[in-house]
């Protein structure tokens, strides 16, 4: 009986491991596609000169890595299986709220730090366009996620801004 159970469980566990690896690989591929589309979109929106691009992208990528590290900490808290199964106590809830505030402050501090770096590379008009392009790209991403289960598409871009049809998220 035990041997038969082991024969059944080993392939199931091996399959789960393969599924997890495949999911991780797919996540990485999607992340790279997302990053490439974002770079193309921002480059187009800012009309970067080759000299500006050469100086800008290493700084922007550095900021993105730091931003991802901060947000990754926040996301890991949400994936905690113990947290999902139990309602937090008042004390735990307050601790989670304070941690979120701390992370949001870290993100704001990061934005301020890199704003200074960006304005040392680009004119403020292009830095403003960067922030607008990031928001537009994020909005498009959220819309595309919402439209995965809905065939409807918005008829026009937000506030007359260029539509992002050349940067599909599907």
Image (cartoon, rainbow, N blue to C red):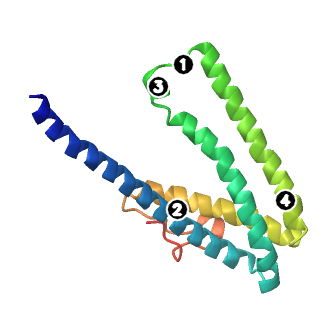
Q: Are marks 1 and 3 in contact (CB under 8 Å)?
A: no
Residue 31's label in the rendered image is 2
* Quadrant the N terminus occupies: top left
Q: Nearer the viewer, mark 3 or mark 4?
A: 3
Q: Marks 3 and 2: in contact by CB < 8 Å? A: no
User: Which numbered marker is on residue 82?
Assistant: 3
Q: Position of residue 129 (x, y in %)?
A: 76, 68
Q: Quadrant of residue 122?
A: bottom right
Q: Residue at x 81, y 67 (%)?
A: 127
Residue 133, position as x, y percentages in the image: 69, 66
Q: Residue 29: image x %, image y %? A: 47, 65
Q: Nearer the viewer, residue 167 or 82?
A: 82
Q: At 84% across and 59% down in the image, what residue appears?
A: 115
Distance between the Cα atoms at labels 4 and 2? 25 Å
In this rendered view, identify the residue nearer to me: 130 or 64.
Answer: 64
- The answer for how far apart the CA atoms under marks 1 and 3 are is 10 Å
Residue at the spot of label 4: 115
Query: Which residue appears farthest toward the top when viewing the image?
Result: 90
Q: Earlier in the sequence, mark 4 or mark 2?
A: 2
């Amino acid at each position: 009986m035990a041997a038969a159970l082991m024969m059944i469980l080993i392939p199931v566990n091996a399959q789960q491991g393969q599924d997890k690896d495949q999911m991780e690989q797919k996540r990485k591929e999607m992340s790279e596609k997302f990053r490439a589309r974002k770079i193309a979109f921002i480059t187009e929106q800012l009309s970067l000169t080759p000299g500006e691009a050469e100086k800008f992208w290493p700084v922007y990528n550095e900021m993105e890595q730091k931003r991802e590290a901060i947000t990754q900490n926040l996301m890991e808290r949400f994936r905690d299986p113990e947290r999902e199964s139990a309602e937090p106590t008042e004390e735990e809830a307050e601790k989670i709220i304070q941690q979120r505030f701390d992370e949001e402050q870290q993100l704001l501090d990061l934005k301020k730090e890199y704003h200074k770096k960006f304005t040392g590379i680009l004119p403020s008009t292009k830095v403003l366009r960067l922030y607008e392009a990031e928001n537009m790209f994020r909005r498009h991403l959220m819309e595309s996620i919402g439209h995965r289960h809905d065939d409807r598409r918005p008829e026009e871009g937000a506030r007359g801004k260029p539509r992002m049809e050349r940067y599909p998220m599907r």
